[in-house]
Image (spheres, rainbow, N blue to C red):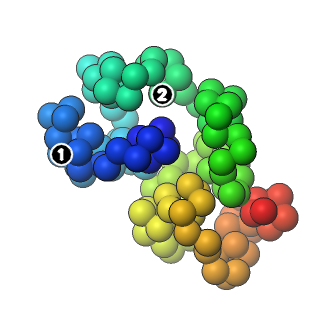
C-alpha cells in the first residue's frame, strides 16, 4: 500500500530491489513471505522502518496519514481478520490486482462485489464502503 500511495510502480521498485515484479506482487498480496534481506531492502527503498512496513497492525495505526485517504475499510478489515489478499481475491472470484485497486480506492466496485465482500467478512456494506 505504501508503494502505491507514493506513486511508485511495482515494476520500478522490483527492478530497483533486484527482484522480479512477480516476486514483489506475491509479497504484496501475501502469497509469499519475504526474506529478512528483502524486508530490509524494501524498507530502505521506501524510506521507512521494517517494523512499520511489515506488521499486522491496521494501516491507519501505522501510517495515520492514510486514515482519511481510504475510501473503504475493506483492506483494514481483511488485515484485521488475518486474511491474505490473494486468498480473499480467490474467495470473491476476482483478480488480486482488481481487489488491490478496490482496497486503495482507485476503483469503485460494483454492488455485487460489495455484497460478496460484506458477506465474506461478515460486515455490513455500510461498515465496509463509504
Q: Is residue 22 above or below residue 80?
A: below
| Residue shown at 66% from the left, 48% from the top | 69
Q: Is residue 37 above or below residue 94?
A: above
- Local SS, label 2: loop
Any part of residue 23 in sight: no
Q: Is residue 30 above or below residue 55?
A: below
Q: Position of residue 118 (x, y in %)?
A: 74, 66
Q: Quadrant of the C terminus?
A: bottom right
| Residue shown at 68% from the left, 57% from the top | 71
Q: Earlier in the sequence, mark 2 or mark 1?
A: 1
Q: Residue under circle 2?
A: 54
| Residue shown at 54% from the left, 27% from the top | 55
Q: Is residue 15 above or below residue 89?
A: above
Q: Nearer the viewer, residue 68 or 123?
A: 68
| Residue shown at 18% from the left, 45% from the top | 20
Labelled disc at residue 36: none
* Distance between mark 2 and mark 1 Cα atoms: 19 Å
- Mark 1 surroundings: few (<14), some (14-19) or many (≥20) residues within 10 A: some
Q: Nearer the viewer, residue 18 or 87?
A: 18
Q: Is residue 20 left or right of residue 46?
A: left
Q: Position of residue 77 (x, y in %)?
A: 70, 48
Q: Residue under circle 1?
A: 20
Any part of residue 22 in sight: yes
- Mark 2 surroundings: few (<14), some (14-19) or many (≥20) residues within 10 A: few
- Local SS, label 1: loop
Q: Position of residue 99 (x, y in %)?
A: 52, 63
Amino acid at each position: 500500500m505504501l508503494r502505491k500511495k507514493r506513486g511508485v510502480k511495482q515494476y520500478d521498485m522490483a527492478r530497483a530491489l533486484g527482484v522480479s515484479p512477480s516476486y514483489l506482487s506475491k509479497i504484496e498480496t501475501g502469497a509469499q513471505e519475504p526474506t529478512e534481506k528483502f524486508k530490509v531492502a524494501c524498507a530502505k527503498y521506501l524510506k521507512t522502518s521494517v517494523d512499520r512496513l511489515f506488521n499486522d497492525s491496521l494501516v491507519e495505526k501505522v501510517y495515520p496519514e492514510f486514515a482519511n485517504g481510504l475510501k473503504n475499510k475493506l483492506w483494514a478489515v481483511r488485515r484485521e481478520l488475518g486474511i491474505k489478499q490473494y486468498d480473499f481475491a480467490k474467495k470473491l472470484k476476482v483478480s488480486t490486482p482488481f481487489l488491490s485497486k478496490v482496497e486503495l480506492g482507485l476503483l469503485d466496485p460494483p454492488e455485487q462485489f460489495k455484497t460478496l465482500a460484506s458477506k465474506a467478512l461478515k460486515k455490513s456494506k455500510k461498515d465496509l464502503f463509504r
